[in-house]
Amino acid sequence: MRRHALLTCAFALAPLACLPDDVPPQPDAGPDASVADAGPDRDAGVDRDAGPAIVERDPWWKDRVFYEIFVRSFQDSDGDGIGDLAGLTSRLDYLESLGVGGIWLMPIHPSPSYHGYDVTDYLAVNPQYGTLADFEALLDEAHQRDIRVIIDLVVNHSSREHPWFVDARSGAAADHRDYYNWRADDPGWRAPVGLGPDIWHRFGNDYYYGVFGGGLPDLNHANEAVYEEIRTIADTWLDRGLDGFRFDAVRYLFENEDGDVADLPETHAYFERLKADLVAEHPDALFVAEAWSSTARIAQYYSDGAQFDLAFEFEISQGLQLATASKDVSRLRSAIASAERLYSDRAFAAPFITNHDMNRLMRDVRVDQRAFRVAVAALMALPGTPFVYYGEEIGMRGGGLEVDEDKRTPFRWTAEAPNFGFTTGTPWRSRAEDDGVDVATQEADPDSLLAHFKRMIALRRAEVTPRLDTFAVVANPPEDVVAWQWGDADPLLFTANFGDAERTVRAAVGSGAVELLAATASVAASRDGSDIVVTLPAQSFGFVSAD
């Protein structure tokens, strides 16, 4: 999530996402940290015997693709220019046709900000988005279409306008004073890279802690009363029928007197306890972590599923963006290798191309639709549970890096200016898009980007997910190429050429007849003895079966 500060990329690709961006790791785990430095151990640093036992659960998310939605920008139902839950409900048929099996809603709680990551009431719905009844209607309609729903749960901090903090700042004797961290002086702790400079904020004669800024005071999770508040909040939403949570900024829940503010052992223990408490009553609830950092650090939030079921793969995201824009696949290859070495279960992965804190990839002047289609195919061929950011499927460009609102602009349903089917009023935000970047136009074109997304999602569910138990990277692929295999007895080979020249891939996969299941035009596949040979034109991909 983005609060205020920006981190300058350490490499010369400023329009692309840094790793991390505005939720950065500690200085010793920056975006250019070598994968080799991560060490050989899976779940390094985690005591896997320390946590409570996990009950038997149904991992329903493993065969689904998720879709991230900023409700404010998806569909307005009442003409006020702000997207809402009723509008989203009216578009569920579209999401079903796209093939997604789950939706993640960015914060839907009351908040003084447009983005909602500073919550003032965790149990209510933002009145700009509707009512609790509207949310329950959304859940019911989504479930009828076999679409699961998760929401953002922002537990690291609250809004400074939350009643807890309003009371806490009234004085040392306030009932909620210990819901936050206070002290008489500023200890001068060093802020995480990209944040700050101040993380202790003065109020009267005292200072309170807020790693993301003074408007976002961190909750004191060492206080048992705060834990019970968070557990009750999560349990209430699950009782309402919600399918799970995306936990925001999980790295920063605890800090110590030495000024360490990220990835503390207490944070891991906290999430193990919270998940165990919640799944005891809601065994099929999904827990997704945003731990914006290196794969080595992200892996520490697994613990055989005791902390989280999924975690976003930021190195994979960066690798996909770099491969698409610069035709350099080295980071993508190293990210996949890192995840292979560090994740004890590859199903922990939640790969994605971009999210709400990043420039949309189609905004990069070096990226055209042909290259972007290769990235989409690779995303749908990767291990884990893929996430798609709303608007990616029609090629939205949004705005630039400097203004977060422009990464979250209203969705385009039709080609009819000025509001493009989003609202009958004045949109809360608007930015120009290329002609044809809308659902209606692309639904009429069988070769559109939207049609490509639909085919790739369908192919993943039909061909990749039945083979999820076995994944192996093809050794020594040609320059600009990534390639891997799914399955043993009934193997599936994926190959992708991000470069500008034709490449040929040879891989010892299977022994049966070769069939090209999906590919860019002019891709060819054949068998040469024990090898499958795939010829890939520039910027192309192929899914090849060899049963």
Image (cartoon, rainbow, N blue to C red):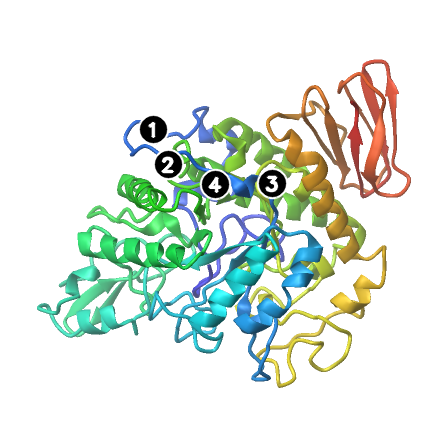
Residue positioned most to the left: 173
456 or 261: nearer the viewer? 456
Mark 2 touching mark 1, by CB under 8 A? yes
Return the disc, 2 or 4, that comes first in the chain's sequence.
4
Mark 2 burial class by Cα count in 10 Å: few <14, some 14-19, many 20+: many
Residue at 62% of width from left, 43% of height from top? 319
Residue at 14% of width from left, 71% of height from top? 205
For discs 1 and 4, the disc positioned in front in the rendered view:
1
Horizontal and vertical percent position of residue 172? 10, 68
Residue 9, above or below 475: below
For discs 4 and 3, the disc positioned in front in the rendered view:
3
Quadrant for residue 361, please give it. Answer: bottom right
Mark 2 touching mark 4, by CB under 8 A? no
Q: Report the residue marked by disc 1.
A: 48
Q: In the image, what residue type sits under mark 3? A: Asp
Residue 368 visible in the current orientation: no
